[in-house]
Amino acid sequence: MNAAAQNGELNRNGANEIYHKGGSTKRKFQESFEPTPLYAAIVTYVNYAVVTLFGFLRDFLRKHGFEKLYAATEDPEMKDFVPLYASFESFYTRNIYNRIQDIFNRPICSVPGATINIVERKFSHSGWTSKYTGKTLKNVVNLGSYNYLGFAENEGTCSEAAIESAKKYGVGVCSSRQEMGNLDIHTKLEQTMADYLGVEACITFGMGYATNSTNIPCLVNKGCLILSDGLNHASLVLGCRLSRATIRVFKHNDMEDLERKLSDGVVYGQPRTQRPWKKILIIVEGVYSMEGSIVNLPGVLALKKKYKAYLYLDEAHSIGALGDHGRGVTEYFGIHASEVDIMMGTFTKSFGAAGGYIAGNRALVEHLRAHSHSACYATSMSPPVCQQILTSLSIISGTEEGRNRIKQLAKSCKIFRQGLKKLGFIVYGNDDSPVVPVLFYSPCKLGAFSREMLKRGFAVVGVGFPATPIVESRVRFCMSAALTDKQIQDALSACSDLSSLLNLNYSKAK
Amino acid sequence: MHTGTTNQVANPNTVVWNSPGIWITYLLTTGFMHLILLSMPWFTTSVSWTLTNVLHGVCMYFFLHTIKGTPFETSDQGKYRYSTHWEQIDSGTQFTAARKFFMTTPIVLYILASFYSMYDFTHFVVNTLVLLLSLLPKLPQLHGVRIFGINKY
């Protein structure tokens, strides 16, 4: 794994292949992050520079009254007070985001399944205001929802069971788990989830983000060391910061960097006193949704055993989506679930519900039940949501339908990714991940692609700066078991048209 | 649009000058501006080189040392709201590669402008003043310093 790290914490090389000897399967671990072509980078920077210069010009015109200012301004009576807002902080929104804002936040009026109905909006010439045209774009193929196993449906066994449980339990108890909010359906859900994952016990929470941010402070505190992957989600970062432990970031999926930081932590101890750390916790995610990469779990486990650290695995995107039975990244690598100390996941993506869970051995879960901020102060999960998870879990783990969904997802991932690579797009990440990020570099191409795809009946999610590095704007396709083969082929042919129209075939790989 | 949800650094301004290809773009843009000035028939070579140096220095001073804060909302609770872009680079770490690059380009331009203006005295004064304007705010000793309270808030 010799990576030339160019962009700070990210691993940039052509292809990253290792054969790991641990685990029962010798699955080839392969991910690729093709480096940015210089031509595309220069054009992107020039794009941003031109738009920024025009932004300064337009701001100057607006400030001195030559152009109408539509943004909210402060009360003229308060002009001698310290200003509430720094207008420069909304520079990006005013001048760059507003130009392509019709590709973000599109309102939909149907369940976000394989197809969605989008309410059409028309933006004014200045980009400040929008109006609904009254039309609805029907049956647009949905390539943006995290609907990995296709459970985002409003008909069928899942929704019927959820409706029944709403009639039985109501919508929620509005109380925390420790007080009055603990229902029998919660216990049943936790037991079922623990059995499914193959661990001793599990605890669930009403919100996936809050699962991370309220429970990491419960597990580590000041005097502990957290080694967190560079691309961890904001919920993990917030949880780490709230815990007041020392955070050291290692380069994304880079085992050499992780080993160096682990050995430094063990050898040198805490910064000034040189005392040993109370705990060392490695935090990684199963599938990283912005890069489409899968964690090198055997490598991390080998290091964890060698340096006696703990491992926290966030399977928000990989539970249900990876592995032959959908058990996540541990099953994908053929590793037993008991080797990971703390397994966290969310129900939002593959189960079509909401909420999160933490699973592990009984002592851990009982500790969280007593000490978690969420168990004490946050309301418990709503019963219809619990029922949705239970029904979808029973479908995934028991029935033929569940196995078909998982197979369909794996097949769609492979077909789509290989199709895009053949067309010459630069696709990041691992071949097996259900998230397919395609690099567009320039925000202009991002806007054009998204609009043209909508015209052809496909809804895609574009992500630009500042959510991604400045030069790596991308479109993130999310595969779903609900998408038929025909829809995927149509999507590929639409991408092919646009590839030649917008000159998007940057890839030099064969 | 804010950086709140999925971002690798709280303030992308700190790492933007380490992105691939940005130094080359910077040099190409400066070169392009110089070519435009060179191609104007009423400027002699000396004047166009000195003008390139002056424009480069003034733009650099404006964008790196006058404008404060970030053009987008960041999730670090306004830590860099009163910092200029120069102070934000690499989160204030001195002597990084990006900072050395920005120290070098005014010097190189100064040497070129002096040479092409045949070391004429007026051009020398102008070029040196612009060089001082470009280099002095970048000194580590002046990190975070606001002389006479100029540009403090």
Image (cartoon, grey):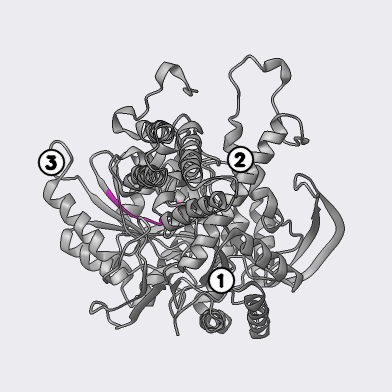
Q: Is residue A94 left or right of residue A33?
A: right
Crowdedness near tag 2: few (<14), some (14–19) or many (≥20) residues, C-alpha within 10 Å: many
What label sits on residue A148 in the rendered view? 1
Q: Nearer the viewer, residue A247 or A158?
A: A247
Q: Tell me if residue A205 can be seen.
A: no
Q: Nearer the viewer, residue B86 or A465?
A: B86
Q: Nearer the viewer, residue A238 or A220?
A: A238
Question: Which chain does tag 1 point to?
Answer: A
Q: Are marks 1 and 3 on the same chain?
A: yes
C-alpha gap between disc 1 and disc 3: 46 Å
Residue at 19% in and 64% down: A305
Where is residue A273 drawn, in percent x and y? 13, 36
First of labels 1, 2 by sequence position: 2
Q: Amino acid at mark 3?
A: Arg
Q: Are marks 3 and 2 on the same chain?
A: yes
Residue at 41% in and 49% down: B15
First of labels 1, 3 by sequence position: 1
Residue wearing tag 3: A275
**Which SS class for mark 3?**
loop
* Quadrant position of residue A476: bottom right
Q: Nearer the viewer, mark 3 or mark 2?
A: 2
Residue wearing tag 2: A91
